[in-house]
Image: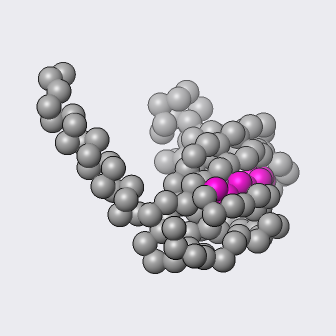
Amino acid sequence: MAEFKKFTIGATKTIQKVVKESDTALSYGSGKLEKLFATPSLVALMLEACYELADPELPEGFITVSKSAKVDHIAPTTLGETVTVKVTVIDASKVFIKFKMEAFDEVGLIGYGEHVRAVVQKDGLLERASQRERSLESKNY
């Protein structure tokens, strides 16, 4: 594996998003709540912040991919509110980066969790995906 600097424990990234109709539970088909921020939108925003913190630190040809995520969505956020996500590196090796994630709206904490991303070679990952795709061609479904 190529050499790159180790991730700094305690490094943080904060991003924000105004809740739009496309971010609601109704848009995800996961409920009839057309004015509330959907859990899948919260998770996606949290993972985006982790990606934005990790990937710019990697050498050319390397990326991170999600390995696992655990998120608790504990409070509702309505259409038009701003969601702020803060992620913090809490552990890191050459292969994995673990993040603490917190999300807030104007009222307070709305969600929290942990996420692990794996450092991979982009070309190798795409080749493995192509191999899996080719293996499907020989199967009759």
Residue 115, percent across and down? 67, 49
Farthest residue toward the top? 141
Q: Residue at x 80, y 66 (%)?
A: 9
Q: Is residue 50 above or below residue 67?
A: below
Q: What residue span does the magenta drawing correspond to?
A: 96-104
Residue 60, percent across and down? 46, 77
Q: Is residue 138 above or below residue 125?
A: above
Q: How many marks?
A: 0
| Left or right side of 4 for 91 | right
| Left or right side of 88 for 47 | left
Farthest residue toward the front? 1
| Left or right side of 30 for 105 | right
Q: Residue at x 48, y 39 (%)?
A: 27
**Front position in the image: 106 or 103:** 103
Q: Quadrant of the C terminus?
A: top left
Q: Is residue 100 above or below residue 16?
A: above
Q: Residue 105 falls in which quadrant of the image?
A: bottom right
**Front position in the image: 46 or 21:** 46
Q: Residue at x 55, y 27 (%)?
A: 31
Magenta stretch contains residue 32:
no
Q: Residue at x 15, y 35 (%)?
A: 137
- Magenta stretch mostly in which secondary structure? strand
Residue 59, percent across and down? 52, 77
**Front position in the image: 45 or 53:** 53
From this viewpoint, is residue 136 visible? yes
Question: What colour-coding does the image apply?
Answer: one colour
From this viewpoint, is residue 87 visible? no
Magenta stretch contains residue 98:
yes
**Front position in the image: 111 or 68:** 68
Q: Residue 119 falls in which quadrant of the image?
A: bottom right
Residue 139, percent across and down? 17, 27
